[in-house]
Image: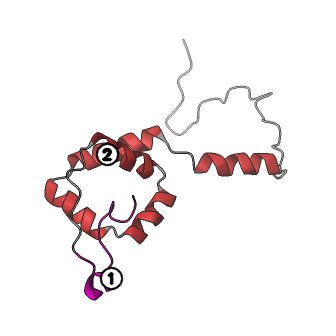
């Protein structure tokens, strides 16, 4: 009969000989590795783009209009640096014609010049 461990006893540990991992090297990455990492960071991700398209598709027309009003051209530039996937997404929307008709531009007056045009796609094209 196999021996059963008692209530307060731990089971026997298996032989751990050879299980230790060698120490890792703590050297700094070279310049080539650092430059490649910088390039990869700014490369658009198709997976992230798909998530953004999905999230935008789930938004109501009212939410999309609110988003468009909230994103100024300056904010859009900053968002494009943070999320390069937005650039490809904006280009795809513009080329497919699904963005709707372009907004009509009022004549430029002193008031419209002091209040920049709002909208995510507003000053980007």
Kindly identify which residue carries mark 2. Answer: 93
In this picture, residue 73 sits left or right of residue 100: right
In this picture, residue 25 sits left or right of residue 93: right
Q: x, y percentage for residue 56? A: 27, 49
Rendering quarter of residue 16: top right
Q: Nearer the N terminus, badge 1 or badge 2?
A: 2
For marks 1 and 2, give the CA distance: 27 Å
Q: x, y percentage for residue 93? A: 31, 45
In the depicted view, which residue is nearer to us: 44 or 100? 100
Q: Write the residue at 82% across / 37% down.
A: 22
- Majority secondary structure of magenta residues: loop
Q: Write the residue at 21% across / 73% down.
A: 106
Q: Write the residue at 30% across / 73% down.
A: 117
Q: Can residue 29 be seen in this snapshot?
A: no
Q: Write the residue at 20% across / 52% down.
A: 59
| Residue 44 belongs to magenta span | no
Q: Can residue 74 be seen in this snapshot?
A: yes
Name above or below for residue 96 compared with residue 90: above
| Residue 111 belongs to magenta span | yes
Kindly identify which residue carries mark 1. Answer: 113
Name above or below for residue 1 compared with residue 125: above
Disc 1 crowd rating (10 Å Cα; few below 14, some 14-19, many 20+) is few
Viewport quadrant of the C terminus? bottom left
Q: x, y percentage for residue 60? A: 16, 53
Q: What stretch is highlighted in magenta?
A: 107-125
Helix, strand or loop under label 2: helix
In the depicted view, which residue is nearer to us: 37 or 84? 84
Viewport quadrant of the N terminus? top right
């Amino acid at each position: 009969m196999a021996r059963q461990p008692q209530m307060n006893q731990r089971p026997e540990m298996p032989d751990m000989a050879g299980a230790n991992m060698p120490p890792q090297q703590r050297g700094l990455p070279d310049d080539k590795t650092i430059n490649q990492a910088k390039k990869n960071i700014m490369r658009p991700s198709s997976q992230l783009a798909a998530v953004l398209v999905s999230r935008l598709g789930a938004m109501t027309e009212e939410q999309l209009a609110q988003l468009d009003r909230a994103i100024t051209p300056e904010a859009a530039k900053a968002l494009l640096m943070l999320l390069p996937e937005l650039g490809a997404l904006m280009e795809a929307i513009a080329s497919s014609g699904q963005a709707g008709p372009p907004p009509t531009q009022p004549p430029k007056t002193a008031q419209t010049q002091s209040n920049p045009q709002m909208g995510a796609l507003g000053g980007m094209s």
